[in-house]
Image (tube, grey):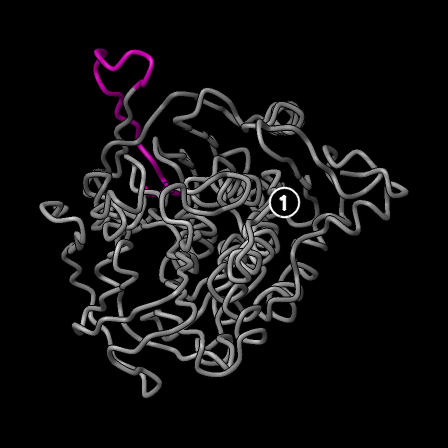
Amino acid sequence: MALRAAPLAVCLPYLSRSFSVSAAQQANKAYKLVVVGGGSGGCSVAAKFAKKLGKGQVAIIEPAQTHYYQPMWTMVGGGMKTVEQSARPMRDVLPTKADWIQDHAVAFDPSSNKVTTKSGDEITYDYLVVAMGIQINWDGIKGLREALDTPGVCSNYSPVYAPKTFKELEAFKEGNAIFTFPNTPIKCPGAPQKIMYIADQYFRKHGKRDKASIIYNTSLPVLFGVKKYADALWKVVEERGITVNTRTCLTEVRPETREAVFVNLEKPEEPEQTVKYELLHVTPNMSAPDVLKSCPDLCDAAGYVDVNKETLQHNRHPNVFAIGDCSSVPTSKTAAAVAAEAGILARNLSAVMSGGQGSAAYDGYTSCPLVTGYSKCILAEFKFDGVPLETFPINQGKERFSSFLMKKELMPFLYWKLMLKGNWNGPRMFRKLFHLGMGP
C-alpha cells in the first residue's frame, strides 16, 4: 500500500526474502549515484559511472550473492550448457570502485532522493538508476510451485529448474509435450518456444518424436511479435508438425493427475480445457517488482518505472533513470535491449550531471536469438513497433548455424567480458559498418 498523505511519501512494501549485509555496506551514506539492482543493466551502468566518478561515489544495492547470465538457461534446459557456466559471484562482476550494499531496497522516496533498505538504512543520492529487473510470480498459476517438484514439469526461468528441463527431455517416453506462454509481460519472449524446438530435435535424435505430440499454448494472438520472424517460425512449426494454440492461457497445474488447465482468452466464458501432459514446460507469470508497484510516485499503473521511452529519464523526477525489464519502455525485455539502453542512458545521465539535458534517443533496439534446435537459430533484431533492425547484410529470418554459434558462444563472451564492464552498448557500430555506413 502506498502512503501518500504527505509530499515526501515513502513507499513501504513487505518483502520476505532474507539477506546478508556485505562488508562494503555503509549505512545512511550519501552518494552521487545509486544504482538499485545488480543485474545486467545495473552492472553495466555502475561500471560506466564508477570509472567516471571515482571510488566511493557510486553505490549498488543488490542482495544476491550470485549473478546469472540468464539467456544461457535455454541452453542449460537443452543440455548444451550447465547452470554453473551461467553463474559468477556477484563480487566478481560489480565494479571495484563502487560500494556494494548487499541488501534489499524496500522503499523509494524520489521526492527526498532516498532509498531505504530492508535493514533500515537510508541511502541518499544525487542521481538514481533503477535496474531491478522483472519479478517472477511462481504462485500466479495455481499448483505450479508444487508441480515443479514433480515429474514432468519444468521451467527454464530459474537456475534451480532449468537443469530439470533436460532431465525431463531424457525421461520423456510418449504423450503430450506442452510449452506455455503466460498472459503477462515476460523477459525474453522468445524463450518459451526456443526450448520447444530444442525438445523437438532431441526427440528426433533419440527416436521419440513419433510418440510425442508437441503443443505450444500461447496467450498471445501471434506466434511472435514481429511479423517477419513470426512468418519464419510458422514455417518451422508446420514443417515439424508442432501444434500452436494462440490466446490459450495456462491457469492451473494438477501434478497428481498430470493435467494442465487452460482458458481460451477470446472466449473466457467457455469451460476451461484440461489436457494431460507427459512433459510440461511452464513460463511463469511475471510482473514489475512489488517494491516498485507500491511506489506510484515512481511508477506507472502497472508498476514499471515511468520513464521517457527514448531518453530513459523519469517523466516526473529528472534525476531518476531506469533501465531494462523494470522500466516502462515498450520493447521486448532482453539483455540485448539492456545493452543498447545502457549507452543511451549513460550519455543522457552524464549530460544531466553536467547541468544539461539528455538528447540521445533510444530507438527500441532489441534482439531475440530464436534457437530452433541444436545447430540453428533465427537471429531476430528489431526496434520500436516491431520494425526489423538487422545487423548483418543477410536475411536474418532464416535458420542459420552461424547465428546459433553467436548465441551459444559469442554472446556469453560479450556479456561477461564487455557488457558487465560497461564496454558494450549493442551492435550499432557493426550494423553501420556492415551496411556501408547507411544503417540506422
Residue 166 location (% of width, % of height): 47, 55
In this image, 31 relative to 330: left or right? left
193 is higher (above) or lower (below) than 406:
above
Q: What residue lies at 47% left-to-right and 40% top-to-bottom?
A: 308
Q: Is residue 343 visible?
A: yes
Q: Secondary structure at mark 1?
A: strand
Q: Quadrant of residue 364?
A: top right
Q: What residue lies at 38% left-to-right and 73% top-to-bottom?
A: 31
Q: What residue lies at 43% left-to-right and 68% top-to-bottom?
A: 33
234 is higher (above) or lower (below) than 293:
above
Query: Residue farthest to the left?
Result: 5
**Quick one: quadrant of the C terminus?**
top right
Residue labelled with disc 1: 369
Query: Residue farthest to the bottom?
Result: 23
Q: What residue lies at 19% left-to-right and 39% top-to-bottom?
A: 142
Query: Residue farthest to the front?
Result: 355
Instruction: Please name whichever residue, 102 or 223, is drawn nearer the observer in this view of the structure.
Output: 102
| The magenta stretch spans residue 14 | no
Mark 1 surroundings within 10 Å by alpha-carbon count, few (fewer than 14), some (14 through 19), many (20 or more): many
Residue 430 location (% of width, % of height): 80, 51
Instruction: Please name whichever residue, 258 or 434, is drawn nearer the observer in this view of the structure.
Output: 434
Identify the magenta region. 264-286
Instruction: Please name whichever residue, 307 or 380, is drawn nearer the observer in this view of the structure.
Output: 307
Q: Quadrant of residue 47?
A: bottom right
The disc labelled 1 sits on which kind of residue? Pro
